[in-house]
């Protein structure tokens, strides 16, 4: 998989210290602006209103919703995103 014209996407999946799963995705893409990152944490209708074609925000928003539905979380950092899911898969 690639992000942008020629940058590879790396995915690392591990079991964390509490027995849950942690998936970290790294890419060499341009990254997201603080305004774009904020959209990931908005309600669906507000997030959609801020999107432009080809934007990765919808995918990150969906990843966040799935993580939270299972008691986990999504962490966004420049060029690196991490999805944390608890061992039980049940919300706390």
Image (cartoon, rainbow, N blue to C red):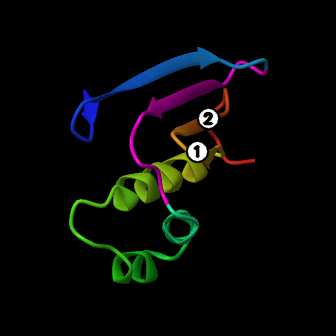
Give the image location of residue 78, x and y in percent.
57, 45
Q: Secondary structure at mark 1?
A: loop
Residue 60 vs residue 75: left or right?
Answer: left
Judge whether 44 appears above or below 8 on screen: below
Could you tell me which residue is drawn at 26 percent across and 41 percent down?
A: 4
Question: 7 or 45, which lies in front?
Answer: 7
Could you tell me which residue is drawn at 58 percent across and 66 percent down?
A: 34
Q: Give the residues in magenta.
A: 18-32
Give the image location of residue 76, x and y in percent.
59, 48
Residue 49 vs residue 92: left or right?
Answer: left
Please name the residue that numbered disc 2 is placed on: 85
Magenta-drawn stretch contains 26 = yes
Please name the residue that numbered disc 1 is placed on: 70
Could you tell me which residue is drawn at 41 percent across and 34 percent down?
A: 28
Give the image location of residue 53, x and y in percent.
21, 67
Q: Secondary structure at mark 2?
A: strand
Among numbered discs 1 and 2, the one appearing first in the sequence: 1
Q: Quadrant of residue 1?
A: top left
Mark 2 crowd level (few <14, some 14–19, many ≥20, 10 Å Cα): many
Q: Are marks 1 and 2 in contact (CB under 8 Å)?
A: yes
């Amino acid at each position: 998989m690639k992000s942008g014209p020629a940058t590879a996407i790396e995915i690392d999946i591990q079991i964390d210290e509490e027995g849950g799963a942690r998936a970290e995705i790294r890419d060499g893409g341009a990254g997201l602006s603080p305004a774009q990152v904020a959209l990931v944490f908005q309600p669906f209708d507000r997030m959609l209103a801020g999107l432009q074609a080809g934007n990765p925000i919808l995918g990150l928003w969906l990843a966040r919703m799935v993580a939270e539905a299972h008691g986990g979380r999504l962490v966004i950092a420049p060029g690196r995103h991490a999805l944390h899911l608890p061992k039980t898969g049940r919300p706390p």
